[in-house]
Amino acid sequence: MAIRSITEPTLDAAVAAIAVDNPATGAPITDVPTTSPDGVRAAVAAARKAQPRWQALGFRRRRALFHTSQQWFLDNRQRVLDSIVAENGKAEEEAVVEFIYCVSAFSFWSRRAKGFLKDRSVRSASPFVFGRGMHTRRAPLGVIGVIGPWNNPLINSFGDAIPALAAGNAVVLKPSEQTPLTALLMLEMARDCGYPDDVFQVVTGAAATGEALIDEADFVMFTGSTRTGRRVAARAAERLIPSSLELGGKDALIVLADAPLERAVNVAVHGALFNGGQTCTSVERVYVEAGIYDRFLTAVAQRVGEIRAGVPAGLGSVDVGAMTFPPQLDIVDDHVRDAVARGARVLAGGKRGEGPGRFYEPTLLVDVDHSMKCMREETFGPTLPIMKVRDAEEAVRLVNDSEYGLQASIITGDAHRGRRLAARLEAGAVTVNDAQSNYLALGLPMGGWKNSGLGVRHGAEGIRKYTKLQSISVNSHPTRRDPHMMPFEPSSYRLILKLVGFLYGRYKARRS
């Protein structure tokens, strides 16, 4: 399978290997070869050759392979968890969430793919196509290139491959160069479960490998920063291939005065600090109505003080792990320093952790405003900035005062009011009395607005994007000649115009 495509010599000997370390300890784990552009081209060519056979298997036989894959995950649970924790530095509980996502994804897509992609009949109101049978069908695009991020090496990498495979595509996955090991473990899974050769492949490397994949694939699924996402979209557009992009976020949480206090505190702290804040849907700014602000702040400060940060050592050992990507530490520190310089106060944390690992203390910021980076730019770290607002109207205005629109959350004692406010927020996904839990609802589409991306994951749209649409019209009872055909006959067109006037003129008169 893909092992041969990841051991091709790179074109640049200076970057022939990628050193992978444990972010929590700084200890080296292993070196992974860099796939050259030629290696990527070979992988995609092999995938393209294998894809028709995979498509021909049909939904039933692919479902059987997915069930085998699901069991492999259950049988190899600890290996999967250990791989994620080692290369990502996150708490094991957070790796469990990634594990659960993929186990459930195999089940969901194996059950729902056929229904989402089935042929659909179309009825037309036009009398000029009377008697035609019309329907649409969907066909796989071919080879899907998935470019994954470093913060969730399973969910946002292999997790995106599952619906693409379910739709009958072959997949070439390029994980982040920071976290390639879990993707390579998925390669082992595919081999153990009996996937056809070359249907799922992994290429490892940095930007040049990703660029080569965009240049060869038939569709690109990218998760990462908005800056890089723009480059991905532009490169894909040059080839006129579609892409789906989940990009940056500055997700907001509104706490209304009628919010149940304990629920609000738990959602805010968990939403901000889960995965060390290194999640596109992390709570990165909180707006609290004045009526509950003091009580909320006191309770949040207490809860943040209870959070355990450090080197993961199994379930129950820590709540917040390491920062995976070294430059992200500098960004988080810069945002905190900028906030303090502009008048914010640090109630907890506020500095890098000690030791060889990459840590930043869980940090609670107050007296913040929109002049500060921590309220406007993506932080992607374990920070919780909280701002007091007069009322819900001010909160909605501030939430929408952002270039991002991935997700937002509202905590309120009135769910109906929460839903009304949700409809006013400029975000692709909104949760009421929750944060992030919607991501496990695989039937619910999720995608960003504004600079947070294009396209969606999950739901019908989340698998249909991996297909091309074909429309078919069948005239089962054709006559020798239709009235509109050449050579044109004036009498026929006068009759057609009378028919148009009869049909649509009467309708217009009734509506006026």
Image (cartoon, rainbow, N blue to C red):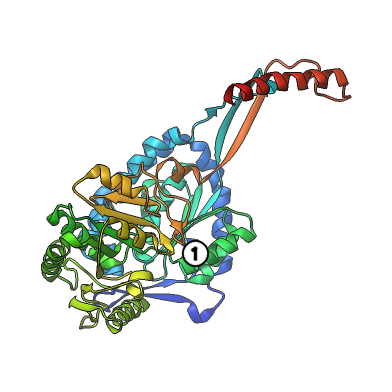
Q: Taking 287 as reference, is 297 left or right?
A: left
**Amino acid type for the residue under numbered disc 1:** Gly
The answer to which image quadrant residue 387 occupies is bottom left
Q: Taking 393 as reference, is 260 left or right?
A: left
- Vertical comparison of 406 with 308: above or below: above
The answer to which image quadrant residue 397 occupies is bottom left
Residue depicted at 14% across the width and 66% down the height? 294
- Vertical comparison of 506 with 135: above or below: above
Packing grade of label 1 (10 A; few <14, some 14-19, many >=20) is many
Image location (x, y in percent) of residue 83: 29, 63
Q: Secondary structure at mark 1?
A: helix
- Would residue 98 be seen by someone viewing this image from the given angle? no
Identify residue for label 1: 229
Image location (x, y in percent) of residue 52: 56, 42
Residue depicted at 33% across the width and 40% down the height? 107
- Vertical comparison of 352 with 364: above or below: below
